[in-house]
């Protein structure tokens, strides 16, 4: 749902989805976020990595069978906020240095490195929300009347002695036959 803030003139964009607290739900969170960021025309990295880590943490450490995990993305001004809510509010994230040979435990360190800031909002019971904010690059304004030098496309010239490739006619609409048949 897209909304406008009248006072500031900035667009507020948001996306929310409930997912199962399973590895598949974490994967879907990343895929949905990636597609939504594409739709909004926003850069995918590092946001998709942050979503992947927060969603994976929620389904690994905040899983309660039968209770969903919620992914919320929203943009206000130049900030993308990512929120993942799970239903195990008594287990708060703990940023710690894992053992060098540990196979897990680096997710929040990655979120810390990629996000501008992150935190936890407790409640309402039994929930908690882990959030991260990313500053978005300033939009580039297209310069319609600026002079450009050089060609934008080189003409295609076939090497001598070669024929132009044959182009197949388009397929007819479904349920109809081609008029030549």
Image: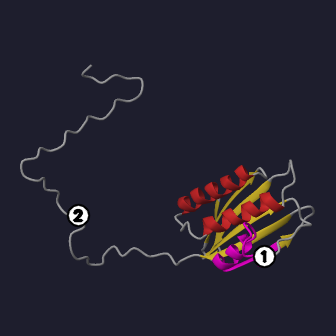
Q: Residue at 73% x, 73% y: name it.
A: 108
Residue 47 placement: quadrant: bottom right
Residue 143 in view of the camera: yes
* Residue of label 2: 153
From the top left corner, tell me how far across and down residue 126 is, in percent: 92, 61
Q: Residue at 69% x, 68% y: name it.
A: 82
Above-or-below relation of 100 to 24: below
* Residue of label 1: 119
Q: Residue at 21% x, 69% y: name it.
A: 151
Residue 1 placement: quadrant: bottom right
Q: Quadrant of the C terminus?
A: top left
Residue 144 placement: quadrant: bottom left
Task: State which region is magenta.
Answer: 97-120
Above-or-below relation of 84 to 169: below
Q: Residue at 82% x, 74% y: name it.
A: 94
From the top left corner, tell me how far across and down residue 17 is, in percent: 72, 54
């Amino acid at each position: 749902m897209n909304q406008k803030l009248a006072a500031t003139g900035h667009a507020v964009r948001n996306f929310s989805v409930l997912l199962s607290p399973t590895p598949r739900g974490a994967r879907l969170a990343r895929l949905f976020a990636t597609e939504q960021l594409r739709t909004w025309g926003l850069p995918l990295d590092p946001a998709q990595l942050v979503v992947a880590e927060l969603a994976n943490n929620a389904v690994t450490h905040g899983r309660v069978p039968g209770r969903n995990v919620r992914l919320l993305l929203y943009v206000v001004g130049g900030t993308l906020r990512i929120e993942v809510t799970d239903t195990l509010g008594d287990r708060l994230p703990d940023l710690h240095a894992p053992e060098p040979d540990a196979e897990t435990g680096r997710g929040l360190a990655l979120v810390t490195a990629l996000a501008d800031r992150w935190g936890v909002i407790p409640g309402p019971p039994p929930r908690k929300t882990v959030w991260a904010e990313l500053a978005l690059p300033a939009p580039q304004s297209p310069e319609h009347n600026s002079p450009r030098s050089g060609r934008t496309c080189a003409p295609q010239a076939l090497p001598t002695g070669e024929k132009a490739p044959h182009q197949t006619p388009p397929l007819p609409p479904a349920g109809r036959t081609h008029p030549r048949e």
